[in-house]
Image (tube, rainbow, N blue to C red):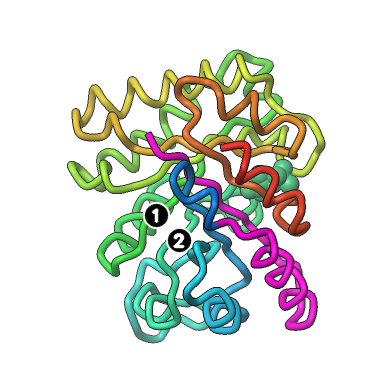
Amino acid sequence: MKKLVVGNWKMHGSRASNAELIQGLLAADLSTTAPRADVAVCPPAVFLADVAAALQGSAIAVGVQDVSVQAQGAFTGEVAGPMVREFGATYAIVGHSERRSYHAESDQLVADKAKAALAHGLVPIVCVGETLAERESGQTEVVVGRQLDAVIATLGADVAKAVVAYEPVWAIGTGKTASPEQAQAVHAFLRARLTSAQPDAAKVPLLYGGSVKPDNAQVLFAQPDIDGGLIGGAALKAADFAAIARAA
Ligand code: PEP
């Protein structure tokens, strides 16, 4: 399966620093990764138009970090799928653990956001993952299974059009990476769950996220059920992100 490497810029950047980062990414010429990996970056929504314009014609796609379940209307502060499509987004991250924990997003809301993304022509990148306490109490499969089941139930056969990112909460921004074996085990579980629900979902790209860096990307991406990565901190450095994309 072709790999997918996505950068999540989170709430970082300015017009000036984004321009510098993009210049670095363009100079790294990620078109050479194209036969093996698709590459995308997800800036804060306010920068989407700038970033999409700067990357137009390059091998790098753009996405957003969240999307509304609504298409239009009196929903103050929300940004809708058709709006971000108009500015060139093709991916929407949904259910990132920072949104689940800081904004109390439920499994059902995340699934509804994935459905809205698809309805508006965006590929949802649905994040699932357990906390350290959940892992230590042996609940990893229960938690990620529950998070995934909401998406399977809500999307039905369309789950085959989604991307799923396994992001153990304890590995995000902490410098602690799941070992390749730990990540592979959860990815194999997610693959089996998807496939038993919808046979076409066997090919859903499963990304790993959580302190992926140039020096651990290759071994993670070599695991049979790891189809790429969702990259946070290292996506803010052009050289690191390019090296990770090349490791795919
Ligand atoms: C993320 O937040 O999606 C992420 C994976 O962050 P980091 O790579 O910094 O751990």
Secondary structure beneath label 1: strand
Q: Is residue 171 visible?
A: yes
Residue range highlighted in magenta: 1-30
26 lies above or below 16 = above
Quarter of the rendering occupied by the N terminus: top left
135 lies above or below 209 = above
Please say if the residues under marks 2 and 1 sit with CB atoms less than 8 Å apart. Answer: yes
Secondary structure beneath label 2: strand
Residue positioned 45% across, 24% down in the render: 225
Mark 2 closeness class: few <14, some 14–19, many ≥20 residues within 10 Å: many
Q: Is residue 63 visible?
A: no
Q: Residue 68, located in which quarter of the rendered image?
A: bottom left
Location of residue 213 in the rendering, given as x and y in whole percent from the top left corner: 74, 39
Residue positioned 47% across, 74% down in the render: 57
As measured in the structure, the alpha-carbon distance from the residue carrying label 2 to the one carrying label 1 is: 5 Å
- Residue 14 colored in magenta in the image: yes
**219 or 128: nearer the viewer:** 219
Residue positioned 54% across, 52% down in the render: 32
Left or right: 50 with respect to 240? left
Left or right: 130 with respect to 123? right
**25 or 189: nearer the viewer:** 25
Disc 1 residue type (three-letter): Pro
Mark 2 and mark 1 lie on one chain; the one further toward the N terminus is 2
218 lies above or below 47 = above
Location of residue 39 in the rendering, given as x and y in whole percent from the top left corner: 52, 54
Q: Specify the label residue 92 is tagged with.
A: 2
Disc 2 residue type (three-letter): Ala
Mark 1 closeness class: few <14, some 14–19, many ≥20 residues within 10 Å: many
Q: Specify the label residue 124 is tagged with.
A: 1
Q: Residue 30, located in which quarter of the rendered image?
A: bottom right
113 lies above or below 34 = below
Left or right: 197 with respect to 15? left
